[in-house]
Image (tube, helix red, strand yellow):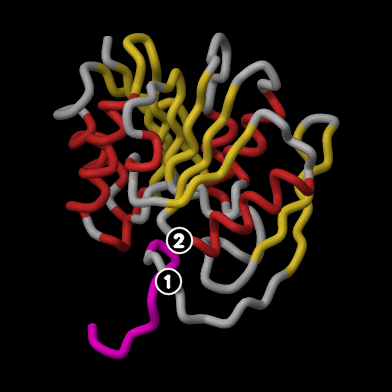
């Protein structure tokens, strides 16, 4: 709608930069995240992200992708959990990517990098064992499906994709649509009004 404020999933949010530091304890490690206006869930880790992190299985993963990383919570936590893996964080929002890069440095995470670009364009030609997504539902179904198809192309033969969505915003429908792209889709977590789906090629 004309005149409406840009969303966090747009390349150039118009809101002023008002940063704050939030903290999150994962296992025995306390992490700090710099957030700001114009990025998703700037006030703290949302319930969907918490559920997604509970669901993701990093076992055996050498490469992981946080697709639509925001200020970097999911990718950085996964990188800390699997220090032997290489984790790439991608977002279309330059402010989010700058914050993700700052948070990588802030938490001293040498096995992670943050890249700016639309969807999987910044990682074209690269394959991943794990892809994690908290998709921009408000961007519309066409955008979310495009991101899923791109993730499908970047997922290794035995890789797995994890997606979280709010039940009231069509999570079950999205899970069924994932089944038209991936060979296997299963709901692996549910709680707090959210569902997490795991998708695989085989």
Q: Earlier in the sequence, mark 1 or mark 2?
A: 1
> Which residues fall within the magenta stretch?
1-9
Q: Are marks 1 and 2 in contact (CB under 8 Å)?
A: yes
Mark 2: give few (<14), some (14-19) or many (20+) Cα within 10 Å.
Answer: many
Residue 25 % position (x, y): 79, 41
Q: Which residue is mark 2?
A: 93
In the drawing, does residue 195 fall left or right of residue 121? right
Could you tell me which residue is drawn at 39 percent across and 46 percent down? 165
Give neighbour class at mark 1: few <14, some 14-19, many 20+ (Cα, 10 Å): some
Residue 186 in view here: no
Q: Does the segment drawn in magenta span residue 15? A: no
Q: Is residue 8 magenta?
A: yes
In the displayed structure image, the side of residue 34 where residue 12 appears, left or right: left
From the top left corner, tell me how far across and down residue 1 is, in percent. Answer: 23, 83
Rendered residue at 44%/66% (across/down) = 8
Q: Give the number of the disc on residue 199.
A: none
Instruction: Give the secondary structure at mark 2.
Output: loop
Residue matched to label 1: 12
């Amino acid at each position: 709608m004309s005149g409406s404020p840009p969303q966090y999933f747009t390349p150039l949010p118009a809101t002023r930069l008002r940063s704050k530091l939030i903290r999150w304890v994962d296992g025995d490690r306390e992490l700090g995240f710099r957030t700001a206006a114009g990025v998703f869930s700037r006030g703290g880790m949302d319930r969907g992200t918490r559920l997604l992190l509970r669901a993701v299985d990093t076992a055996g993963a050498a490469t992981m992708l946080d697709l639509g990383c925001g200020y970097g919570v999911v990718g950085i936590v996964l990188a800390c959990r699997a220090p032997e893996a290489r984790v790439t964080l991608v977002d279309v929002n330059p402010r989010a990517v700058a914050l993700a890069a700052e948070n990588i440095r802030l938490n001293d995470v040498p096995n992670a990098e943050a890249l700016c670009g639309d969807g999987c364009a910044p990682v074209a030609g690269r394959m991943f064992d794990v892809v994690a997504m908290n998709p921009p539902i408000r961007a519309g179904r066409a955008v979310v499906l495009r991101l899923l198809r791109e993730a499908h192309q970047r997922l290794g033969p035995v890789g797995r994709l994890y997606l979280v969505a709010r039940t009231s915003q069509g999570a079950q429908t999205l899970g069924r649509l994932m089944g038209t792209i991936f060979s296997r889709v299963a709901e692996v977590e549910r709680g707090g009004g959210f569902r997490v789906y795991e998708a695989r090629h085989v």
